[in-house]
Image: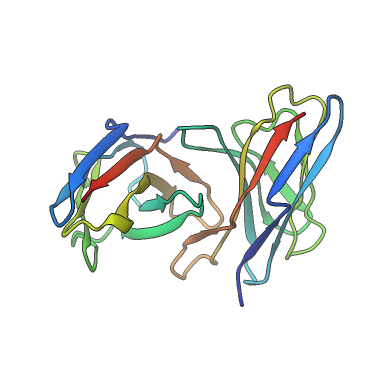
Amino acid sequence: AQTVTQSQPEMSVQEAETVTLSCTYDTSESDYYLFWYKQPPSRQMILVIRQEAYKQQNATENRFSVNFQKAAKSFSLKISDSQLGDAAMYFCAYRRRTSGSRLTFGEGTQLTVNP
Amino acid sequence: DGGITQSPKYLFRKEGQNVTLSCEQNLNHDAMYWYRQDPGQGLRLIYYSQIVNDFQKGDIAEGYSVSREKKESFPLTVTSAQKNPTAFYLCASNTPSGTLNIQYFGAGTRLSVL
């Protein structure tokens, strides 16, 4: 079974600084997707960024980028120029490429942004 | 607007009572999912459905039931057999295979026991 591990229950960053959230996963599959979701205090889950395992290039979305290390099964999220609105719970998630397959989530990292 | 609608936003259950959480989507997605979230924890899969009239158990299906009679709707019933139902429940649906394959979420239902 696939597992996703986020080893940092809490992280904090100063506004305008950069922070990196860690995620490791375990799978025997070679083709899959990885995601970072953000859950602000409203509890609405919002997709931040998505990576396809067959792509070597790291995904980037504005201030958000990932460091995808397939051999090490590592998928970290880097947030640059942190803003107060980035404060949220961040979840790493894994999904097989098969149609209709489920998401497996990590335990989450609570990010605090200090002004 | 296209999206996933969950209702009610807050729900209270009495001892021994079954309650049903609604999830409706107008995104034309085939696959739908129910997750449970406990305080400070990640999401755990309860049930999922890849097509109408078919569904599969997730990791924590005991004490829950679902139906999928229409593509747009995937209601979750929390039965009296679920002894610890207090949690935040999230419904999701997924874009078809071959596209972006992204899972979108509703705003959630918070269930509490009276």
Task: Give the quadrant of residue B88.
Answer: top right
Decide if residue A95 is in sight here. Answer: yes
Q: Nearer the viewer, residue A84 or B6?
A: A84
Q: Position of residue B3 (x, y in %)?
A: 60, 69
Which quadrant is home to the N terminus of chain B? bottom right
Which quadrant is home to the C terminus of chain B? top right
Q: Position of residue A113 (x, y in %)?
A: 25, 48
Residue at 47% over, 69% down: B98
How many numbered discs, if any?
0
In the rendered image, the residue lying farthest to the bottom is B1
In the rendered image, the residue lying farthest to the left is A17
Q: Position of residue B63 (x, y in %)?
A: 75, 29
Q: Nearer the viewer, residue A4 or A61?
A: A61
Residue at 79% over, 34% down: B13
Q: Is residue B92 left or right of residue B62?
A: left
Decide if residue A53 is in sight here. Answer: no
The image shows residue A85, relative to residue A4, as above or below, that is: below
Residue at 68% over, 33% down: B61
In the rendered image, the residue lying farthest to the top is B83
Task: Give the quadrant of residue B66.
Answer: top right
Q: Nearer the viewer, residue A75 or B7?
A: B7
Q: Is residue B114 left or right of residue A74?
A: right
In the rendered image, the residue lying farthest to the right is B17
The image shows residue B75, relative to residue B17, as above or below, that is: below
Q: Position of residue A66 (x, y in %)?
A: 22, 54
Check the image and tell me how it is coloured: rainbow
Residue at 69% over, 38% down: B111
